[in-house]
Amino acid sequence: MPTLTARALSAASSARAWLEGPVGTRLKQGFNIALSVLILGLLARAIARVGLDEMIAVLPATPLFWILWTAHYLLPPAVEWLIYRRWWPIDWRGLGVFVKMRVMNDALFSYSGHTYLLVWASNLLGVRFDPASPPERLLGRGGGAAADPATNPFAAVKDNAFTSGLAGNFSTLLWLLLALGLGGTGLLGEGSAIDSRALRGLLIGFGALILLSFGIIAFRERLLSLPVHENMRAFWWHLLRVNVTHLLQIGTWIVALPMIPVETWLLLGALRMVIGRMPVPNKEVLFAALAAQLAGDASIQVAALMAAQGVLHLVYHGLSWVGATAIEPGAARNPA
């Protein structure tokens, strides 16, 4: 009697065959159009809540600001593309897929972009599920051989998500040490803008983040599937991505409000990195309170700049989605 897994794989195989037919092809095209309309509609609504006029009034016109901001926006998908092109047969147009992945993760919900990438990669690599064959190990190498990222997109996407998270957590620790070195302890003492309950939540969240990282490392054989050298290579790329992207954003702050000392911006950037990675509520409120305490008389300008960059981020999402949609259909090279 067929097992539940075999039945599920058989149903998935039948559904895939139907989707590759004429009706399924039209359905997929309609879904892609509907997804684009949904993404652009959500972004337009979010932008309308703040307004483009306010954003334009705050952001500087100097070309250096826009160069730094554009580099800050495009670096994350570019690094993802560099990692995956080692494993998969994609050319420069494949960058559009990773731009879409970033937009979906931000505009819809976390890891929705990774799901999109997994489906796209399965089609690219021609992955087929055979109900008669034994199911592959989905988590971890265990005592067996490592998975090949060129033929196992699930292992590639899963492991890359883990190494990306580890790089982000490690970077957060580095920026926390920088914040403490720049005098961040003074912001947490008596008279701090952060109340004791919020501070306690921040410390608990940071402790949970560190424990999670150690847990991933300790149980890497059960969680990671790719060869160690592939995961280490991806880890170093993600470490570069996280820190350079953050430095580029701090660079936009320095260019936009040069009257504020660079040391203050570095401290503010370090605190933003730490708060942004913490699993705590009201992150923006915490950061705004610290920004007001640090910036002093310039707190209003800082708050306006942060709000304007939030809108600008959404505008770039919309423009990038349109551009990615235009180049994505020709993303795959013919495998050798």
Image (tube, rainbow, N blue to C red):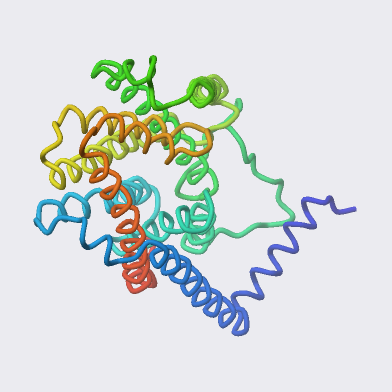
Q: Is residue 210 visible?
A: no
Q: Position of residue 43 (x, y in %)?
A: 42, 65
Foreground pick, 313 / 237: 313
Residue 69 lies, with reference to residue 258, above or below; the image says below
For this orientation, the residue located farthest to the right is 1
Q: Residue at x 43, y 26 (%)?
A: 194
Residue 203 lies, with reference to residue 118, above or below; the image says above
Taking 317 as reference, is 219 left or right?
right
Q: Quadrant of residue 119?
A: bottom right
Q: Position of residue 57 (x, y in %)?
A: 21, 61
Q: Residue at x 28, y 50 (%)?
A: 304
Q: Quadrant of residue 98?
A: bottom left
Quarter placement of the C terminus: bottom left
Numbered label tally: 0
Residue 96 lies, with reference to residue 41, above or below; the image says above
Taking 333 as reference, is 135 left or right?
right
Q: Residue at x 60, y 25 (%)?
A: 143
Taking 37 as reference, is 299 left or right?
left
Q: Position of residue 7 (x, y in %)?
A: 80, 57
Q: Is residue 42 visible?
A: yes
Q: Residue at x 45, y 49 (%)?
A: 150
Q: Position of residue 130 (x, y in %)?
A: 68, 57
Taking 97 as reference, is 214 left or right?
right
